Image: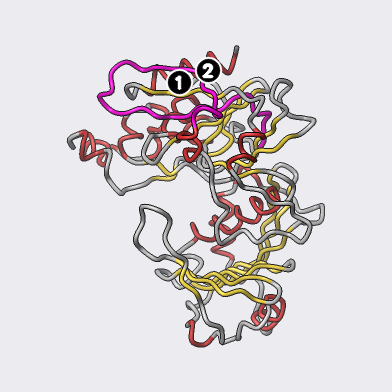
Amino acid sequence: MTRLTTAKSFLADTLTGLEIAGALHLDFDGYRTEVSSNSQELLDALGDYFRDFLSDGAENAHTVIHALEDAAPEPSDLGVEFTEKQPDPGKTKIKEEYAELPDGRAVRKRLTGMLFVFGGGVNVALGPCLENDNQVVNFVNNRFIEWTLDRGSLLFHAAGVAKNGRGMAFAGFSGMGKSTLALHVMRLQTDFVSNDRLMVQRDAQGDAGTGLVMYGVAKMPRINPGTVLHNPSLTPVMDDEERDRFAAMPQSELWTLEHKYDAFIDECFGEGRFRLAAPMSCLVLLNWQRDGGELIVSRVDLSRREDLMPAFMKSPGLFYRPGDDAQLDFSEQAYRELLDRCPVYELSGGVDFERAAKKCVAILEG
């Protein structure tokens, strides 16, 4: 097994004698990515997943990623000592470990054994990629997130939609249903921007009122059976047998199921409805509860509502390694200053996705 001394040497040694099957070319709103692999099956699977963002590769890529199918490397063979990544607040399971390299970082997924090495222009995913293509998808998207953050964006834990040149972001505390609300709003003829992450920055091409642009991530919504059953547009996601089985479950059990589906935007809402950038006109924060009474929509001032800040602030995590020239400030004050001209709305009271969707589109169109 190739030892981890530097990211650059690791890639060179790993590629020695390896037959590359081909490459996949992607375009994320002008950010061009080439994914090279020794597995055509993996390239086909990734090409299907990223079908909204395929390109002909005529222009040089900003980033080249090597996704290499192989057995999971043993940590003891890599010649480095990994440090456990402590779980996020509220979580207990350690899922990742990492090692800093002179020119990059190595991250190992403890459950699957997948190894990711990146830094200095090197981007490698090594291990059973086909069995864990979702982790390869995330790695590809994390390169776009890194590129965008290095250019002055802040990361939001948020979903996003857009209509007629105006974008709306949805955020909320865990389990509030930001993705579910975004998909209800999609039924009202909006475009999809992102499911779970938004990068937001000031830009001359941003919304005339806020001066902001939001960038999404090319990841399909991961939704639970309850979301599918209550949104007719999501019918293609599950077959009739599954639908009948889940429909027979009590609501309390249905909404807590750890069972997820990928909802492909083109299958559920039509082709051409997934974009990765839009002027950001407002932010909607979900702070409601089931059986909470009447839905309340109110505009809020974040300088007086510090309790709402954790609902959308997001740490970049292990897969972000800042570039040499990156100017980083992920403080609460930086988020407040970014949003100083952006209207922020709170949804409180009781959960009502259909009514909330109509209210949100009215705000977006207003």
Residue type beneath disc 1: Ala
> Mark 2 sits on what residue?
361
Rendered position, 256 above or below 138: above
Residue 304 screen position, x and y as percent:
52, 27
Disc 2 and disc 1: Cα gap in Å?
A: 6 Å
Rendered position, 69 above or below 4: above
Residue 32 screen position, x and y as percent:
73, 51
Q: Is residue 260 left or right of residue 121?
A: left
In magenta stretch: residue 109: no
**Region of the chain picked out in magenta, as a range:** 277-305
Residue type beneath disc 2: Val
| Residue sitting farthest toward the right | 59
Give me the disc on residue 107.
none
Disc 2 on helix, strand or loop?
helix
Q: Residues within 10 Å of mark 2 (few under 14, many from 20)?
A: some
Quarter that holds the N terminus: bottom right
In magenta stretch: residue 298: yes
Give me the disc on residue 357.
1
